[in-house]
Image (cartoon, rainbow, N blue to C red):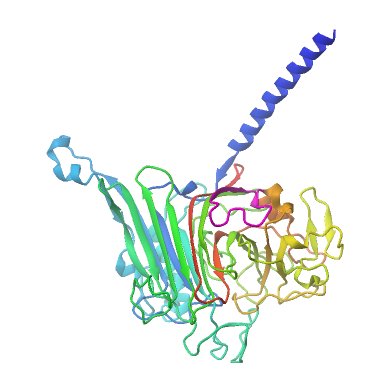
Amino acid sequence: MAQVLHCAVQALFLAMASLYGVICASSENEYISAVGDPGMRRDGLRLAIEAWNQCNEVGEEAPNMGSPRAADCFDIYKASPQQGENQCSLCNSMPFMLVHRVTEEENRLRLGQPFLGGQQEAFNNVDLYAAEKEVYLGNKCQVEDIPNPWQFWMIMLKNGNMDTYAAKCPNNGLKVGPYGPDSRFPCFGEGCMNQPSIYHNYTTLQGPSQATLKGAFYGSWNLNTKSSDETNGNISYYSVTWEKELGKGSWIFHHVLRTSVMYPWLMLYLRADATTGFSGGYHYSTRGMLKIIPESPNFKVKFRLNVIRGGGSSSQFYLMDIGSCWKNNGQPCNGDVTSDVTRYNEMILNPETPSWCKPNDVKLCPPYHTFPNGSRVHRDDIAHFPYEAYHLYCSPGNAEFTEKPNIVCDPYSNPQPQEILQILPHPVWGDYGYPTRKGVGWIGDPRTWELDVGRLSQSLYFYQDPGTPPARRQWASVDLGTEIYKDPNQVAEWTVSDFNILVPKKY
């Protein structure tokens, strides 16, 4: 009898295990990609670059560079002779041809130059012009898809210098006059908020067999330097090169960012942004790679990251950075910079980044932490709150009912108020696939990550006015890269490949 029972139990166990495997496989199959180029494997690349000043505006174009938007988008065609392979020697020597969709003349479009589809009022406004140019380039690069068309991966550059006497940046969305000095912001004097030079090596087929696709964007904020002076260690510099074997594997994006004495606060990210509407941090219509906007709690992000140089102790290297926008009453943003609030969550990978959230000084801690099982602990609960899991939390400048003590986020670095929650490697994030200890995934430890960003982002604290319906947490920007914060003469270098965002198939 015992033998029969044992066999029955074993059979039941095997059946359940088999069923579980089917369920797991089915569950995996029920996810689809939210990006137009899943895993960065499409030979016909779609890529753009944008540059901003401290408050996500343009302010002033760099001389001879045009408006700081450019794109490298192309299709690949295979030679197909009509009358026999041997009758086309050119087809044999050049079996593939790249056809670029954006010309150099279009990439160099600058203030005052009209273009098809552009709004007349934008042609003489430097900030509006850049936004309209991005839409124009997006139309040139667009790929039709289901459920929505998409345009390109986005490289983002940002200069953290701010001239407080120039009064170019609003305070929590409200225009303010000149003031200063302000030690929070670096500035060497008039013109310190300038846009960088942007030089472009269009993607071409290279190598002995013409089977390697390769291109680059590069430049400097030090505008009196040579265009490709990467070896000069005294100047700011950035470059992003991309490379892929034709028909094989993923694009590999290789990033370099260097700060200087004049430009100590610089940012470089690779972003998947919304294809329409606002992306995280902007109040203009943007273009990007997200044909589906991921929403908490149901999305995952996969990518491979190799950090080669970290950028120093003040490099806030973001393993993952997500950006969204909703008003304090939970309603979606509508472009009103006085009531819209940009919300960010950033996991800082740099092991030198300390926790500023302290049990004896909780003003830089979120009011609550929620564990994966749904239980919640207040920041005053010294025995249970995971203080070392947080670098900092800052609240929106227009929030009326924040829990005290607190600090308000920098009111100048976005066109609208912002809320930022920065987290650090810690065991409490392990259930979501994030690093559980410092040093994991850092220099010398390249890794392929699969992060349950949706479930994590649903659990995080973000401010809302009491009694208002919870906001839909839709993340119009998903990116990674670094922000070197006020630290001159530092170099960060890293590669990204195989990037993908997965959402439930119901979308």
- Provide residue 152's location: percent of width, then percent of height: 45, 57
Along the viewing direction, whichever of 26 and 111 lies nearer the viewer: 26
State the residue at coordinates (26%, 48%). Answer: 210
Q: In the rendered view, tell whether residue 126 sits above or below residue 25.
A: below
Q: Is residue 83 visible?
A: no
In percent of the image, x 58 and y 63: which residue is there? 317
From the viewer's perspective, is 361 left or right of 98?
Answer: right
In the current view of this chain or complex, which residue is farthest to the front? 444
Of 354 and 384, nearer the camera is 354
**Total numbered circles:** 0
Q: Is 395 placed left or right of 188 in the picture?
A: right
User: Main SS type for the magenta part?
Assistant: loop
The segment highlighted magenta reads: 433-453
The N terminus appears in which quarter of the rendering?
top right
The answer to whether residue 78 is above or below residue 277 is: above
Q: Does residue 280 appear in the picture of this structure?
A: yes
- Placement of 306 over or under 20, stated as above or below: below
Residue depicted at 83% across the width and 56% down the height:
376
**In the image, residue 372 above or below residue 258:** above
Displayed quadrant of residue 32: top right
Residue 438 among magenta residues: yes
Which quadrant of the structure image shows residue 219?
Answer: bottom left
Q: Nearer the viewer, residue 67 or 507?
A: 67
Residue 463 position in % (x across, y down): 75, 66
Q: Which residue in the rendered view is the most extreme toward the left? A: 87
Residue 463 is one of the magenta-drawn residues: no
As drawn, which residue projects farthest toward the top?
A: 1
Asked where in the image residue 353 lies, by quadrant, the reply is bottom right
Tell me where residue 279 appears, x and y as whole percent.
Answer: 56, 64
The image shows residue 240 at horizontal and vertical percentages of 42, 62
